[in-house]
Amino acid sequence: MKKFIWLGLAGGIVFWNTLASADNKHANVYSKNKFDFYILSTQWIPGWCAVGTGKSGADLDDTHACQQQVNQPLMYHGLWPENSNGTYPADCTAVPPLNTAKLSFSNPFDSYLSNSASFLNHEWSKHGTCSNYYYAGLESASEQEYYQQVNNYFTKSIALYKNINLATFSFKLSAESIQQQIHRLNPQIPAKSIMVMCDKDQNTQFLTGLWFCVNKSSDKFIDCPSALLKTSCKGTLLTR
């Protein structure tokens, strides 16, 4: 595998917490879906290509993402509702495929996945429908509002992801060093908001992702619950 180059990336009755005016560009936040916080999930492409198991239905573009140099080895994966006890809601409502003509953001998977369109739909269907950007039936009640919320859900989380500055990681690093390096470059990200994800190839651990705990407004990094932090990888990892 070639060396990666990475850069800092500087009807029904509906109850809602905030009802925006017609010209308000911020998301209406619905309270029907219950969860405690979000995980902003990212994948570390060098390790994910090498040993990442399952890959969550993603079809990695081996020629582009895995064999060629890419500007950013940290791939956006999604924004996932999560509970403090380690459980999480998923696939809360069956929704039709997204109409790409109504999306105001660029598909973040285009540079990495050969199934980027279907994976975007997967992320919205599995996780977005459980978020506070959606309630069951919104797509029928108001298509305009539905796509406004879809766009808000992705746009806000992609913006968080793009503002994460990355160090040039050494070939071998401890999980704690990865957390601390990211925190030093990003004071807005507490070290305890970062979960280091890995997969093993025999006895060697490869960095395969970083998960960040985020508040329910999806605009601020927060400390992860201690029970969740315990599932973060420990020890030394290879970064490529």
Image (cartoon, grey):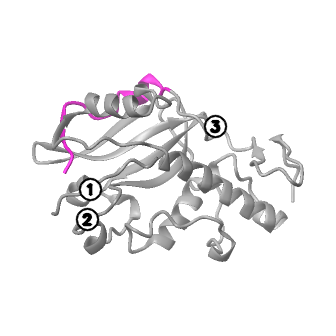
Which residue is disc 3 drawn over?
216
Which residue is disc 1 drawn over?
5
Q: Along the horizontal axis of the image, is 171 left or right of 87?
A: left
Pick the residue in front: 101 or 82.
101
How would you rate the neighbour count of disc 2 (Cα within 10 Å): few for under 14, some for 14-19, many for 20 or more? some
Give the SS element for disc 2.
loop
Q: Are marks 1 and 2 in contact (CB under 8 Å)?
A: yes
Q: Earlier in the sequence, mark 1 or mark 2?
A: 1
Mark drawn on residue 69: 2
In the rendered view, would you say 47 is above or below 187? Answer: below
Q: Along the horizontal axis of the image, is 197 left or right of 35?
A: left
Residue 4 percent location from the top left of the image: 23, 57
Mark drawn on residue 217: none
Name which residue type carries label 2.
Gln
How would you rate the neighbour count of disc 3 (Cα within 10 Å): few for under 14, some for 14-19, many for 20 or more? some
Name which residue type carries label 1.
Ile
Question: How far separated are the C-alphas under marks 1 and 2?
Answer: 6 Å
